[in-house]
Image (cartoon, helix red, strand yellow):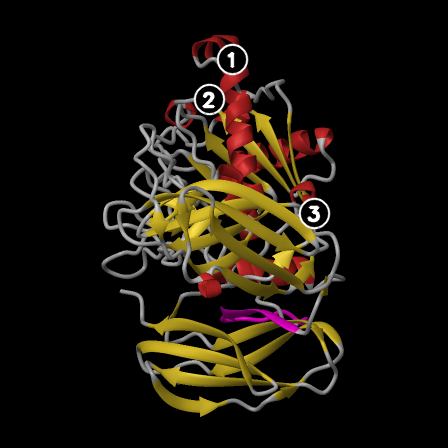
Amino acid sequence: MLKNIAPIVFLMLAFTWNPDAPVASARRATAEGAVDLAVRNLELTQGVPGEPLILGKLTVARVQIDLPPATNLDAQIRLEVDGKTYERAANLVGPTVTVTLKIDALREIKPITATVSVTPTGQATDPNLSDNSKTVTYQTVRTTERVVVFFLPVDWTPEERSKYDYNNAFKQHVQEAGDFLMSTYPLPADRVIVDYTMTPHMLSSFEQTLADSQGKFNMRNALALYANLSFAGRRYRPDATMVVGVLPPGWFRAHGQPGTLGFTLSDVKGIVTGQYGANLPPIIAAHEIGHLYSLDEDYDFAIKPSRPCVAIFLPSYWAEHELELIDTSTKRLCTFMSAASSQDNYWVDQRIYEYLLGKFALNGGAASAPLVLAATMTWRVEADGSPGKTSANVRRFEPSQPVYVSVAGIALQAGSTLEVKLYRGNAFLRALAPQTTTAGNRWYPFLIAGTHSLAEDVYRVDIYLDGQLVKSNQIEVKASQ
Ligand SMILES: [Zn+2]
């Protein structure tokens, strides 16, 4: 982990665009006669597959349909969710195609059942209708947290404003970073507030001096700068969770920190700066607010070879942009807590999403059934059983660190049993002393291993609620080099 100054390397986003339900511009003749359509999968998603649905967050249904290879066929897709019907005509091309339907935001805490059926509409008929429909059920969760991010332009001179098309560029930067935050966080859209001012905050020469005459970083000046920016942003938005100071291109080089593109100070919470570039990273707000909610870095430069990225292997879907996000051999899909690079794409993985959902829902939220929302690995726990500061979702433990799992239970019944089993690789090692639940929402911390008690290896932790496997997580124990 980097102390005090965490450089943020800005990135360029170029997402893999996989349009679903492809419609050929010069349409091939559609199939005639008997064609067997089959619904292979129906999924309701808000960005991360397999998660409970959050009230008020944009939700889509994704229908995966199989048909004979090289077949082209018109079909009608009919979806029923929570008593409402959604229909869409699509031209399907074999052997498999995924069709997406946007559904209305969910408003009530109750289990949601969705049923889809697909029928050919052209000259073709389907001789086997038994595999043309599918039904799935999801649980719902109400979150209570609200995140406010305020973008403050800092030190933009009139010359720089004109040179970089400030009026358009700054607004676009705010919009992209806010959009990414809203899409990746387990919160309804109206609980993620993005605000900004167009009036640049100008700095004194003392605040601008981040290095002394020998080029050494000047902590006193940096603290003054950060305290001042934090205060300036909160004059506009007293309720800001995070103030993002946006500096003009070249600012760090001009003020004694060449090679830096942004940084955070661990001593001044809720403020971060980043230097503006033509292709700005949209992950800055999501990453820094993640730290405020205790998330650890996903880059690991303490071992060789270093690991700048935690890759996301579950195909994910950016509903707001209708984008399928896939990790490929040429372009990795990294979590937003990874180091930023122009080579990679970014999203949120299951572990980060589930942990944040626990943070955002346990405190006064509700669920449609007793659920374990997260099993988050950490080396220290707070008094309430949640993971401690900057230690939530640790992927690699030093042998000298204790290993805990914090289990987020929501709407649990009193007297249920939570059990944790530890595996080394796939070999069962031991079961921990079970914990009996109390009614409602709570974090349940389990100490898995004390310091220096696990050999270097990969370990798996399985969580059982009343005998049912509900969560699984994996860590590595390995000393830094
Ligand atoms: Zn960081």
Q: Residue at x 58, y 59 (%)?
A: 115
| Amino acid type at image mark 1 | Thr
Closer to the camera, 416 or 72? 72
Q: Nearer the viewer, mark 1 or mark 3?
A: 3
Q: Are marks 2 and 1 in contact (CB under 8 Å)?
A: yes
Q: Is residue 8 above or below residue 248?
A: below
Is disc 3 surrounded by few (<14), some (14 to 19) or many (20+) residues within 10 Å?
some
Q: Is residue 186 magenta?
A: no
- Residue 367 located left or right of residue 377: right
Question: Is disc 2 placed on a helix, strand or loop?
Answer: loop
* Marks 1 and 3, how far apart at CA: 34 Å
| Amino acid type at image mark 2 | Pro
Query: Which label belongs to residue 143?
Result: none
Q: Which residue is mark 3?
A: 146
Closer to the camera, 347 or 229? 347
Q: Nearer the viewer, mark 3 or mark 2?
A: 3
* Marks 2 and 1, how far apart at CA: 9 Å
Q: Which residue is mark 2?
A: 248
Is disc 1 surrounded by few (<14), some (14 to 19) or many (20+) residues within 10 Å?
few
Magenta stretch, residue numbers: 371-384
